Image: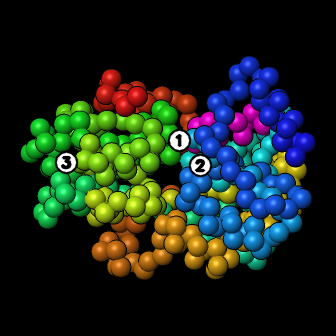
């Protein structure tokens, strides 16, 4: 408890510290403190962490929810010695996590469970993919029905061309300058030359909205303010609780993401963070993650997509390209030219 109080005092007195976490909750009443920082909404992951706490009554887990960019900045600065490090980090902006590992910010661990992960979900025994989630198109079921539902990017392009008035100001996606996850998806889309430029042109034509947060975007679709949300995680759609929101895994290709777990090199409770990692890789945790919409288990063909249409974003050094300053600036300039001032406050 003392070290978390000290961390708070340091954060309050440091002038250029990134903004604080969005929410905090405490789970468990044990004597040993564990600090988990994550980009996952607390409400979605709570059943998983509560079960871990039940199995480990000696622990008290402090769960801090962060935006991806601020979590990365905090973790990078902590690694450089500017503050007290978390005991574990779980982030959807996996390119940022790969950067942290590459910067020697992670503590290694190897076990039967981690070695059983496929290569695309682990890197250097320092980063592990916990979930499997598709990037989807969400839509309002009342406003779009039948053949009007765009089941691919090509269909979405046709819809924007033929019904620009209907879609004007009613398509939303992440503001990639504010969202590390949104930036990752945009970077991945930019590698698909057949549709990326045309999509941005279409978004510009209908004055699509770039905004910050999954929950806000999905709520907008449920309310009918947005007809379509592009490139949002399927887990947030499934957890929206709204019968008005439908989900499309695009037929041309669907990106699959695995949220990355890392134990910081300077973590005070490394052994406990390893216990949490090992639990997250158990069949019981996988079942809980599936119930939360965080783990999509399917065979090729079950989704109606071909194997080549499922594009997993691997935990690998290739993601460092997404962090390249020149590439990032080019993509941000291209994106800003598309959305101009049409960014949700």
Outermost residue toward the front? 29
134 sits to left or right of 112:
left
Q: What residue lies at 25% left-to-right and 55% top-to-bottom?
A: 140
Sequence-first tag of 1 and 2: 2
Give SS at disc 3: helix
Give SS at disc 1: helix
What whole-number distance in Å separates the C-alpha atoms at marks 1 and 2?
Answer: 10 Å
Mark 1 touches mark 2? (CB < 8 Å): yes
Q: 10 Å neighbourhood of mark 1: few (<14), some, or many (≥20)?
A: many
Give SS at disc 2: loop
Q: Is residue 12 visible?
A: yes
Residue 104 horizontal/vertical position (percent): 78, 45
Q: Quadrant of the C terminus?
A: top left
Sequence-first tag of 2 and 3: 2
State the residue position of label 1. 180
State the residue position of label 3. 157
Residue 2 horizontal/vertical position (percent): 90, 42
Q: Which residues are magenta?
A: 68-78
Residue mark closest to the camera, 3 vs 1: 1
Q: What residue lies at 25% left-to-right and 47% top-to-bottom?
A: 224
Instruction: Report the front residue among 259 and 251.
Output: 259
Mark 2 touches mark 3? (CB < 8 Å): no
Q: Which mark is residue 39?
A: 2
Residue 7 horizontal/vertical position (percent): 83, 36
What whole-number distance in Å separates the C-alpha atoms at marks 2 and 3?
Answer: 31 Å
């Amino acid at each position: 408890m003392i070290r978390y109080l000290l961390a708070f005092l340091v954060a309050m007195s440091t002038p250029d510290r990134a903004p604080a976490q969005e929410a905090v909750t405490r789970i468990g009443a044990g004597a040993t403190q564990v600090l988990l920082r994550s980009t996952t909404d607390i409400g979605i992951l709570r059943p998983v962490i509560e079960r871990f706490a039940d199995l480990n009554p000696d622990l008290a887990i402090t769960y801090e929810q962060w935006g991806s960019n601020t979590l990365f900045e905090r973790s990078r600065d902590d690694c450089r010695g500017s503050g007290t490090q978390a005991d574990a980090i779980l982030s959807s902006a996996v390119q940022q996590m790969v950067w942290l590992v590459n910067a020697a910010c992670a503590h290694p661990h190897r076990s039967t469970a981690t070695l059983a992960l496929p290569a695309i979900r682990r890197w250097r025994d320092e980063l592990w993919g916990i979930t499997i989630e598709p990037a989807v198109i969400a839509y309002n079921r009342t406003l779009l029905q039948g053949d009007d539902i765009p089941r691919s990017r090509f269909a979405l392009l046709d819809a924007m061309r033929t019904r620009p008035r209907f879609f004007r100001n009613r398509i939303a996606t992440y503001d990639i300058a504010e969202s590390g996850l949104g930036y990752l998806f945009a970077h991945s889309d930019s590698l698909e030359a057949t549709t990326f430029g045309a999509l941005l042109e279409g978004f510009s034509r209908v004055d699509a909205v770039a905004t910050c947060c999954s929950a806000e975007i999905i709520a907008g679709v449920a309310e009918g303010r947005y007809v379509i949300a592009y490139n949002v995680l399927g887990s947030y759609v499934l957890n929206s609780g709204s019968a008005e929101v439908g989900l499309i895994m695009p037929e041309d290709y669907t990106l699959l993401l695995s949220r990355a777990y890392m134990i910081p090199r300077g973590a005070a409770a490394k052994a406990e963070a390893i216990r949490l990692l090992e639990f997250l890789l158990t069949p019981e945790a996988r079942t809980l993650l599936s119930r939360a919409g965080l783990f999509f288990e399917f065979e090729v063909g079950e989704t109606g997509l071909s194997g080549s249409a499922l594009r997993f974003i691997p935990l690998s050094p290739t993601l460092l390209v997404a962090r390249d300053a020149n590439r990032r600036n080019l993509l941000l300039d291209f994106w800003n030219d598309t959305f101009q001032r049409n960014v949700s406050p």
